[in-house]
Each structure stands twice: as structure tokens, then as C-alpha cells.
Image (cartoon, grey):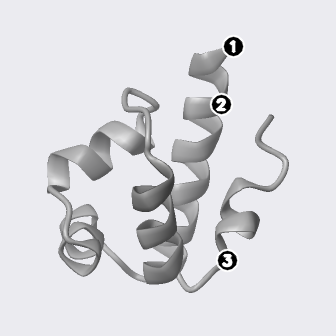
């Protein structure tokens, strides 16, 4: 079950990242995280803290609640 929410979150991040024209590296630079961490998130291999999820949401120009909506 944890993996499913990680995958869903990662897919949402990837979709929004691409829609905003970011590469993984570009998004990572924008939020101050490592590129491989962003890749791990998108593949559902990484648990994301609320702090990092909020940074990602801001960089993608969405509210944290929008980024998380419907993932459970």
C-alpha cells in the first residue's frame, strides 16, 4: 500500500514537472534537492517529507494540497 501512494505521488510530480517544462535536474535545482532524489521520487522509490513535498509543490506552482489530493 505504501508503494502505491509513492508511485501515485511520483507520477503526479513527473506529470506536473513535464507540464512546467522542467527536467529532473532543473526541478532539483529549483527546490535545492539532488537530481537523483527527484528521480527516485518519480519512480516511487523514495518517501518524501512534508517539507520536501511543499518545496516541490511551490516549484511546480501548485498548493501542497493539490499535489497530494486523491493519492490515498
Q: Is residue 40 left or right of residue 35?
A: right
- Relative to 34, residue 27 above or below: below
Q: Which mark is residue 5?
A: 2
Task: Give how far across and how far down residue 17 sits, in percent.
Answer: 46, 69
Q: Label 3's element?
A: loop
Q: The C terminus is located in which quarter?
A: top right
Q: In front of the other: label 3 or label 2?
A: 3
Of callouts 3 and 2, the N-terminal one: 2
Q: Which mark is residue 63?
A: 3
Q: Label 1's element?
A: loop
For marks 2 and 1, give the CA distance: 7 Å
Query: 62 or 26: which is nearer to us?
Result: 62
Of callouts 3 and 1, the N-terminal one: 1
- Look at the numbered discs 2 and 1 and tell me whether their residues touch, using CB distance below 8 Å: yes
- Mark 2 burial class by Cα count in 10 Å: few <14, some 14-19, many 20+: some
Q: Is residue 27 left or right of residue 2?
A: left
Query: 70 or 26: which is nearer to us?
Result: 70
Amino acid at each position: 500500500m505504501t508503494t502505491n501512494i509513492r508511485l501515485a505521488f511520483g507520477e503526479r510530480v513527473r506529470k506536473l514537472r513535464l507540464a512546467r517544462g522542467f527536467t529532473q535536474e532543473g526541478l532539483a535545482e529549483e527546490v535545492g534537492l539532488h537530481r537523483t532524489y527527484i528521480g527516485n521520487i518519480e519512480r516511487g522509490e523514495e518517501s518524501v517529507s512534508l517539507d520536501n513535498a511543499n518545496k516541490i509543490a511551490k516549484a511546480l506552482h501548485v498548493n501542497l494540497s493539490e499535489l497530494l489530493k486523491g493519492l490515498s
